[in-house]
């Protein structure tokens, strides 16, 4: 860190998730970092005209509210950065900052275009050009749906911007897409570190809508004067750190050496390793792994699988029945439930869509000859055990494809708060699990700003700060034989 040991630096992380958004004040001093959540607001899909959308302008307004709260404290803030989920985008053009309300990645409009694209241009070409995991939620298939259903929008559009970078544009006036989030679109070539000209041409997308790409940690410039005036502050620097939340979270994994994998645990579970270059092999494609861009030219070689979305949707369904449960209560009840009473394959397509999740889980169990969970504790245990077994299977595939020896699993993000799920993950994978930090995404966002401004020298120095600042819980594998036996049962489940 530059300057004397007592030098303080302050940064703002705007961290957007599928359930909520937060504005967080980060403070770096004496080789340690602290975070303070200053503003939180609910987020989620809005249903309109039979579609799922994002209210991005409301999100922008909430972020400005958070910035106003921080500026009112008269803290000297040096920079601000936004991170969000990947995939989704905003179209602008014809002098308009937004041509339509952006779609949510879970909207069903890609069901047809995904199936069609796997035939033409075809899975082999798509993977060779992008190295990205095949999922119907990817930007590629949404743009194909746009082209099919609303071609007039693409005809007048000047550009598309991913959600985090659209907000950077509203803050700074600079219209670019940062590489880590560009790589989630399945239109970015990780070998050339540029948009895939071949895919853009084959799909017939207008080239003009693809904005310039910038590397992680790019300074975009100060807040626009109108925004600075609105929040009552000075011209704070806007930085595109890792606009993709998982990219920011992986940067903050407090690991060293090479025998580790990471699991970013939240609505999604993203499990992978950090590589020096993309791995575009037939085995990687066959196993449906993805090559996403990380900070400093690294590759996040991972698989994106269903995560705590299953439990989030159960909680939402129960809340509609006036039964409200917090995660701690559900975990306590799950500990008392019968081990391995029922298992699901979280990859089953029915679990990807919202609504009626308890009914879907119960139906799957009945269809596979298992007793359906009945109590919230039984549902929670079923979800946790099934996720842990899916982690183990995915980690096994990861070892096969990369040849890596993995003995440690770093779990970061909101899911790292669940002691029970962390222990199940250790039991199922046979790895030592290191749980935490919970706020990995916000930490990565904040500390990558520090690297961009020269206050930290490298990614390794960033991880040193994380280790010095937070306690990490350790979980050793237990009940190995019981978990080996149930893994055989899990492997036989259909999807």
Image: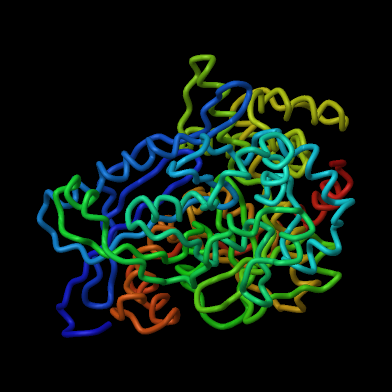
Q: Position of residue 453 (x, y in %)?
A: 30, 76
Q: Position of residue 258 (x, y in %)?
A: 61, 81
389 sits to left or right of 59: right
Total numbered labels? 0
Q: In this view of the protein, can residue 180 be seen by the observer?
A: yes
Q: In this view of the protein, can residue 474 be seen by the observer?
A: no
Residue at image coords 31%, 49%: 23
199 sits to left or right of 79: right
Which of these two is toward me, 235 or 80?
Answer: 235
Answer with the quarter of the image where residue 80 lies. Answer: bottom left
Which of these two is toward me, 450 or 220?
Answer: 220
Answer with the quarter of the image where residue 285 lies. Answer: bottom right
399 vs 95: above or below: below
Which of these two is toward me, 170 or 118?
Answer: 170
432 sits to left or right of 132: left
Residue at image coords 48%, 33%: 329
Q: Position of residue 105 (x, y in %)?
A: 62, 41
Quick one: quadrant of the C terminus? top right
390 vs 459: above or below: above
Which of these two is toward me, 121 or 312?
Answer: 121
Tell which residue pokes out farthest to the top in this image: 321
Q: Position of residue 442 (x, y in %)?
A: 39, 58
477 sits to left or right of 403: left
Residue at image coords 66%, 28%: 357
Tell which residue pokes out farthest to the left in this image: 74
């Amino acid at each position: 860190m530059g300057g004397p040991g007592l030098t303080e630096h302050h940064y703002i992380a705007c961290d957007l998730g599928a359930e909520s958004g937060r504005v967080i004040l980060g403070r770096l001093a004496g080789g340690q970092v602290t975070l303070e959540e200053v503003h939180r607001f609910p987020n989620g899909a809005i249903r309109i005209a039979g579609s799922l959308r994002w209210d991005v302008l409301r999100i922008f307004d909430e972020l400005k509210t958070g910035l106003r709260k921080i500026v009112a404290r008269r803290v000297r803030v040096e920079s601000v950065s936004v991170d969000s989920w990947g995939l989704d985008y905003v179209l602008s053009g014809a002098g308009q900052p937004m041509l339509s309300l952006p779609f949510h990645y879970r909207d069903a409009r890609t069901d047809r275009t995904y199936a069609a694209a796997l035939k033409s241009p075809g899975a082999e070409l798509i993977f060779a050009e992008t190295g990205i995991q095949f999922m119907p939620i990817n930007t590629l298939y949404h743009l194909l749906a746009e082209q099919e259903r609303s071609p007039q929008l693409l005809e007048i559009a000047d550009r598309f911007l991913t959600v985090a970078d659209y907000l950077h544009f509203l803050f700074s006036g600079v219209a670019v897409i940062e590489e880590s989030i560009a790589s989630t679109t399945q239109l970015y070539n990780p070998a050339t570190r540029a948009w895939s000209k071949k895919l853009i041409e084959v799909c017939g997308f207008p080239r003009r809508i693809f904005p310039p790409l910038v590397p992680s940690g790019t300074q975009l410039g100060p807040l626009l004067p109108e925004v600075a005036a609105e929040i009552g502050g000075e011209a704070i620097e806007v930085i595109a750190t890792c606009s993709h939340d998982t990219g920011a979270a992986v940067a903050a994994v407090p690991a060293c050496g090479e025998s580790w994998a990471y699991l970013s645990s939240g609505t999604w579970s993203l499990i992978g390793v950090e590589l020096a270059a993309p791995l575009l092999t037939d085995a990687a494609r066959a196993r449906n792994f993805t090559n996403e861009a990380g900070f400093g030219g690294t590759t996040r070689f991972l698989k994106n699988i269903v995560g705590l979305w299953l439990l989030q949707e159960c909680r939402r369904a129960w809340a509609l029945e006036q039964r409200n449960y917090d995660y701690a209560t559900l975990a306590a009840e799950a500990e008392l439930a019968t081990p391995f009473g029922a298992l699901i394959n979280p990859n089953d397509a029915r679990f990807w869509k919202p609504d009626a999740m308890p009914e879907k889980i119960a139906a799957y169990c009945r269809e596979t000859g298992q007793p359906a969970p009945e109590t919230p504790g039984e549902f929670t245990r079923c979800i946790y055990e099934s996720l842990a077994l899916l982690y183990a299977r995915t980690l096994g595939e990861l070892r096969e494809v990369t040849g890596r020896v993995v003995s440690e699993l770093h779990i970061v993000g909101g899911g790292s708060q669940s002691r029970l799920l962390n222990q199940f993950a250790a039991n199922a994978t046979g790895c030592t699990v290191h749980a935490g930090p919970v706020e990995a995404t916000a930490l990565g966002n904040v500390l990558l700003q520090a690297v961009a401004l020269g206050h930290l020298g490298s990614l390794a120095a960033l991880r040193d700060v994380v280790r010095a600042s937070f306690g990490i819980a350790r979980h050793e594998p237990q009940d190995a034989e019981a978990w080996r036996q149930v893994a055989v049962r899990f492997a036989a489940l259909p999807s």
